[in-house]
Amino acid sequence: AQKITQTQPGMFVQEKEAVTLDCTYDTSDQSYGLFWYKQPSSGEMIFLIYQGSYDEQNATEGRYSLNFQKARKSANLVISASQLGDSAMYFCAMREDNTNAGKSTFGDGTTLTVKP
Amino acid sequence: DGGITQSPKYLFRKEGQNVTLSCEQNLNHDAMYWYRQDPGQGLRLIYYSQIVNDFQKGDIAEGYSVSREKKESFPLTVTSAQKNPTAFYLCASSVTGTHRDGYTFGSGTRLTVV
């Protein structure tokens, strides 16, 4: 069974508007972390935001926020005030404490295109 | 500045040839990882290492080998046994192996079989 599911292969958003990228996950661990990474066309993966399973508040980092709904096993990324430079592929990932070396499992990604 | 350096950026391999991808970090991170990415897809784990002289197979280790003789270095060899090696390879590192630590990635190596 896939541990990380990103159901939106591609998304479009108008510049300056907000956009939500969906991510659901599957784990039986109580302690885990959820991450979002951005991959521009250059290929390098850039860490955006982290949410711990025991964190009571949703994580925020500048224009990025994570809408964490633990009961639904959902960790959606919200990008506010989209910019042209936000056009990239976005990956949701999970690390479980119970696995060896805290390996990360990645979703298949969502390609975001910001329109001017 | 601290970071991860992957080299080369582009690599071409002939059929039946072994090639080695370099990954060096100066972040003093304990854990290092190799991932493979095929076009339009997510990352799949090849090998990972938590400490020097120790490493474990990931989900798609067949046809690959690694070594971890130094904390800073985690080279990946793509052997002739890997039948479909054309892909983008990403090296990553983290402070520890717990869930709280995000990865720092290198800029990747794009391998093509010719």
Image (spheres, coloured by chain):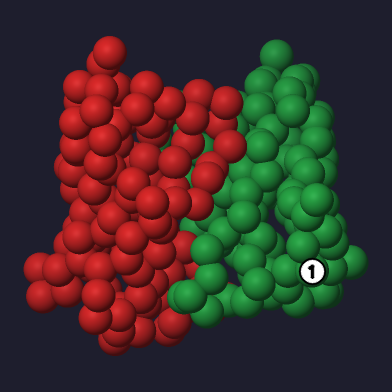
**Can residue A2 be seen at all in this image of the molecule?**
no
Residue at horizontal 29%, vertical 55%? A65
Element class at badge 1: loop
| Furthest residue toward right | B69
Rendered view: B14 above or below A48: above
Q: Residue at x 35, y 84 (%)?
A: A31
Q: Residue B93: name its quadrant.
A: bottom right
Is B84 left or right of A54, judged from the image as shown? right
A51 and B25: which one is in front? Answer: A51
Q: Nearer the viewer, residue A9 or B55?
A: A9
Q: Quadrant of residue A85?
A: top left
Chain drawn red, letter? A
Judge left or right: residue B51 versus residue A81: right
Q: Which chain is green?
A: B
Q: Relative to B100, does residue A89 appear above or below in the rendering? A: above
Q: Residue at x 50, y 24 (%)?
A: A41
Quadrant location of the C terminus of chain A in the rendered image: top left
Q: Amino acid at mark 1?
A: Asn
Q: Provide residue A45's location: percent of width, then percent of height.
A: 54, 42
At a point 30% along the width and 80% down the height, the residue shown is: A55
Quadrant (top left, top right, bottom left, bottom right) of the N terminus of chain A? bottom left
Quickly name the residue at label 1. B28
Q: Which corner quadrant of the image does residue B28 belong to?
A: bottom right
Mark 1 neighbour density, 10 Å: few (under 14) some (14–19) many (20 or more): few
Chain under numbered label 1: B
Q: Position of residue A64 (x, y in %)?
A: 33, 50
Residue B4 seen from this side: yes
Residue A97 coordinates in the image, percent (x, y)? 44, 82
**Residue B20 image offset from top left, x and y in percent:** 82, 40
Residue at far left of view: A72
